[in-house]
Amino acid sequence: MKIVWLAPEPPVPPLTGGRERARRMLDYLAQQHAVQLITFASPEEEPSLMELRRKLARLTIVPYPSRRESASSQMHRVVAEALEASPEVAHVQGLEMQRYVPRNAHVRCVLDLHDVPSLLKARLIKAETALLVRSRNRLELIAVKRREAEAVCRASAIIVVSEHDRKMLSSAHMDQASKIIVMSNGVDLDYWTLSESDSDPATVLFPGALNWPPNIDAAQMLIRSVLPHVRVRVPQVQAIIAGYQPDPALRALAQADASFTLIADPLDMRPIFARATVVVVPLRAATGTRYKILQAMALGRPVVSTPIGAEGLDLEKNVQLSIAPLVEPFSEALIQLLMHPARRAELVRAGQAVIRRYAWDNYLPVLDSLYPDAV
């Protein structure tokens, strides 16, 4: 089968959740099918794409930044040319890439939504406090819902990350519900393996893509709201925020506040996880599932998450991880873990007991129902 895969960014390190998921799916499909990857990428990312290129039938790169008119026009042209070559399927990663598929294209379209855009936008609005920002974003939500409805209608199949997301998307687009299937996120248990801690006492880690609005909000909540509560009881606590492309506001906050360390664009997160006493997920808005929780559990690090942060994962509250809402209950849960090593060890043991069910091999075969015919 010939597949054209449209990606907003290349699935190469540093691997965000979306990049990791895309890389796993591409590796799996390329074993059986002729896959052409079309993606935006920077010159710095092109060398990392060479390994993947050897597995693919074709790789086409459009330079960043994708929002410039010239890059957008080039992507329209590249996609149109690829679809004129008569592939059987266009795999569209994310709502933003759907606009590059011509309306008259005679190709089966699989829409891959590792986040549900309308739900995510609505939750971000709920988390915002500035009335002017909320008003502007409500107008944006209307536009997102319109684009999402059109994309869902055009798609032959829609992939989401969790059963929760499937239900939410189905309720918003009831006439399209039969198209929606679940392929959960997994974790590479050969890469993310149990390791000894070399953490300093009381070190809190928040990992994630730091250009993603929910993670930006969560990082700011951690620094401005959670840690002041924690320091009353655990004055020696240190914080690390680490991830891809930190937002300028986070960089400015790190320069002004020496109480936490910002680590930008690490190629290997494992040594950073090793420094953590506790991994935190103080999210107020999200959809899909959180790689950072699976990675922390695989590495043997206890986790404190908000309910939304752990949404979509089949984990028991306060058994495999601690779950509490912001701000005071979350802070108290974090304090308890920092102060009680035995409780941390309980969560780690329980996490290790279930983490194998999240291995990628358990989820990738879902793709066989969408791409059944080998080359």
Image (cartoon, rainbow, N blue to C red):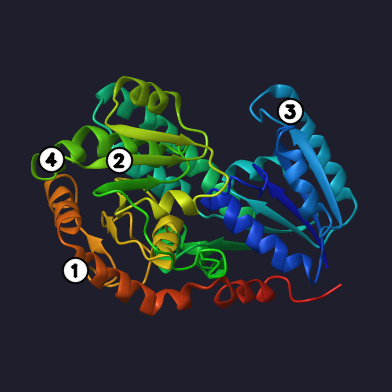
* Tag 3 and tag 4, C-beta contact below 8 Å: no
Few, some or many residues within 10 Å of mark 2 (<14, 14–19, 20+)? many
* Image location of residue 108, percent across then percent down: 74, 60
Q: CA distance from mark 4 to mark 1?
A: 22 Å
Q: CA distance from mark 3 to mark 4?
A: 46 Å
Q: Nearer the viewer, mark 2 or mark 4?
A: 2
* Image location of residue 122, percent across then percent down: 35, 43
* Tag 2 and tag 1, C-beta contact below 8 Å: no
Q: CA distance from mark 2 to mark 4?
A: 13 Å
Q: Within the image, what quadrant is residue 64 found in?
A: top right
Q: Nearer the viewer, mark 3 or mark 1?
A: 1
Residue at the (86%, 57%) spot, across then down: 57
Provide the residue designation for mark 4. Answer: 229
- Label of residue 71 in the image: 3
Residue at the (56%, 73%) spot, across then down: 363
Indicate the secondary structure of the residue bearing disc 3. helix
- Label of residue 182 in the image: none
Mark closer to the chain start, 2 or 1: 2
Mark closer to the chain start, 4 or 1: 4
User: Quick check: 73 left or right of 292?
Assistant: right
* Image location of residue 280, percent across then percent down: 30, 51
Provide the residue designation for mark 2. Answer: 239
Mark closer to the chain start, 3 or 4: 3
Indicate the secondary structure of the residue bearing disc 2. strand
| Amino acid type, label 1 | Ala
Q: Nearer the viewer, mark 3 or mark 2?
A: 2
Image position of 127 with respect to 334: above or below: above
* Image location of residue 22, percent across then percent down: 63, 56
| Amino acid type, label 4 | His
Mark closer to the chain start, 3 or 2: 3
Quadrant of the snapshot with the C terminus: bottom right
